[in-house]
Image (cartoon, rainbow, N blue to C red):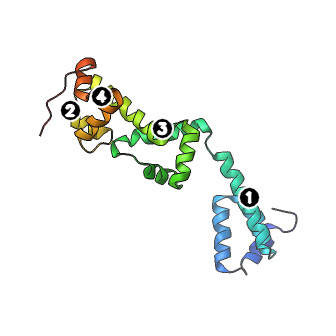
Amino acid sequence: MNHYTTRGEIDGKAARMPGELRELIEQVRSHFPELAEPFAGAAARGNLREGARHLVSSLIEQIHRQEPSGDDMATKLHRFMVTNLHKGLTLKDLAGFLGYSKKYCSDFFQARMGEPFSRYLKRLRLEKAEQLLKKSPATMSQIAESIGFHDQFAFSHFFKRATGYSPKRFRERHGKPSLPDSR
């Protein structure tokens, strides 16, 4: 509450305001009670611009205080990618998750993670594939699907280009024997 008006005066004047403005003030009051009084006071005095400016700047301050730190955001990005690796992630998926454009997400990702999205995705896929080839009896098709490839041939091509070994050869050298592929 400011020194110009009391809550009672605000509520009295608010009753005479257009319905949309009253509704907006009530929404602000229900979500951000500490911000509602200065906004409602300015609106009651007929100075919507002042009230809106105060409300927006206060909301921006709150957002910045609640925004995760770089480390938290890096963890959040990593967790999103690991959790959704099987879906064949794209930059478009990341943009949808973050709620920004693909270009902004690409720049944001590189700044937070220290490498481009595509390289990070490739590294995650490779690490998981190697882990599964070494420790899991899963078929090549199952491994391919678990890291976002729609068929084992695309996976085999990706893996061989990245490691110099076919997945089968890598498993023979480093891991468990595979289950026969069901076709």
Query: Relative to 15, does residue 55 appear above or below in the rendering?
Result: above
Quick check: can you spot residue 111? yes
Farthest residue to the top: give it: 173
* Separation (CA) of disc 2 from disc 1: 55 Å
4 or 2: tag closer to the N-terminus? 4
User: Which quadrant does the C terminus fall into?
Assistant: top left
Tell me the crowding category of disc 2: few under 14, some 14 to 19, or many 20 or more residues within 10 angstroms, Cα based.
Answer: some
Distance between mark 4 and mark 2 Cα atoms: 10 Å
Q: Are marks 1 and 3 in contact (CB under 8 Å)?
A: no
Label 1 and label 3: CA atoms lie apart by: 31 Å
Q: Percent x, y for residue 152?
A: 23, 39
Mark 1 nearby-residue class (10 Å; few <14, some 14–19, many ≥20): few
The residue at the point 65 percent across, 68 percent down is 26
Give the quarter of the image for residue 170.
top left
From the viewer's perspective, tell me whether residue 2 is left or right of residue 60: right
Q: What residue does disc 3 label?
A: 78
State the SS at label 2. Answer: loop
In this view of the protein, which residue sits in the foreground, 61 or 151? 151
Q: Which mark is residue 132?
A: 4
The quarter of the rendered structure image containing the N terminus is: bottom right
The image position of residue 37, as x and y in percent, is: 76, 64
Residue 114 falls in which quadrant of the image?
Answer: top right
| Kind of residue indicated by mark 3 | His
> In front here: 132 or 14?
132
Residue beneath the point at 28% across and 36% down = 157
Between discs 3 and 2, the one toward the N terminus: 3
| Residue 73 visible to an observer of this rendering | no
Q: Is residue 1 left or right of residue 180?
A: right
Residue assigned mark 1? 57
Q: Which mark is residue 162?
A: none
Residue 80, horizontal then vertical, whole percent: 45, 42
Quick check: 97 left or right of 66? left
